[in-house]
């Protein structure tokens, strides 16, 4: 394993949500996935741990307590028009 699983645990994500998410839009990047025989990567077992963390009911409770609303990129785009630098 490449990553210390404590860094992608439920408590680690709860700490990020409490300490780093401010008002407005925040993107949280992760790479959840399942181990399959046809896929090989350095970051493999961690992907399944990310699924367990993201789907843990404690995370939904934390989101609700903090008033954080999950949205997808399409929803984000309905509220923001991307601008290109000149």
Image (cartoon, rainbow, N blue to C red):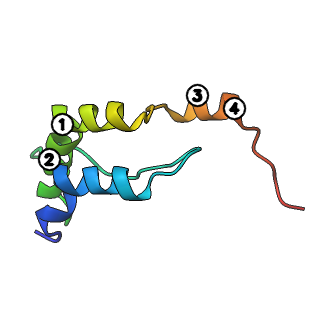
* Vertical placement of residue 25 versus 43, above or below: above
Q: Earlier in the sequence, mark 2 or mark 4?
A: 2
Q: CA distance from mark 4 to mark 3?
A: 7 Å
Q: Disc 2 on helix, strand or loop?
A: helix
In the picture, the quarter occupied by the N terminus is bottom left
Q: Earlier in the sequence, mark 3 or mark 2?
A: 2
In the picture, the quarter occupied by the C terminus is bottom right
**In-front residue for pair 68/37:** 68
**In-front residue for pair 75/42:** 75
Q: Disc 4 on helix, strand or loop?
A: helix
- Crowding near the residue tagged with mark 4, few <14, some 14–19, many ≥20 C-alpha atoms within 10 Å: few
Q: CA distance from mark 2 to mark 4?
A: 32 Å
The part of the image, by quadrant, that contains residue 82 is top right
Q: According to the image, label 1 marks what residue?
A: 58
Residue 37's disc is: none
Q: Earlier in the sequence, mark 1 or mark 4?
A: 1
| Residue 13 placement (x, y as % from top left) | 27, 52
Q: According to the image, label 2 marks what residue?
A: 48
Q: Earlier in the sequence, mark 2 or mark 1?
A: 2
Pointers 1 and 4 in contact (C-beta within 8 Å): no
Q: Earlier in the sequence, mark 3 or mark 1?
A: 1
Q: According to the image, label 3 marks what residue?
A: 75
Q: CA distance from mark 1 to mark 4?
A: 29 Å
Residue at screen point 20% across, 34% down: 55
């Amino acid at each position: 394993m490449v990553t210390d699983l404590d860094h992608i645990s439920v408590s680690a994500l709860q700490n990020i949500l409490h300490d780093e998410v401010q008002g407005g839009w925040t993107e949280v990047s992760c790479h959840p996935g399942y181990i399959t025989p046809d896929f090989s990567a350095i970051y493999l077992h961690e992907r399944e741990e990310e699924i367990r963390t993201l789907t843990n009911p404690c995370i939904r409770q934390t989101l609700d307590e903090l008033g954080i609303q999950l949205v997808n990129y399409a929803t984000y785009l309905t509220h923001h028009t991307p601008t290109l630098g000149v």
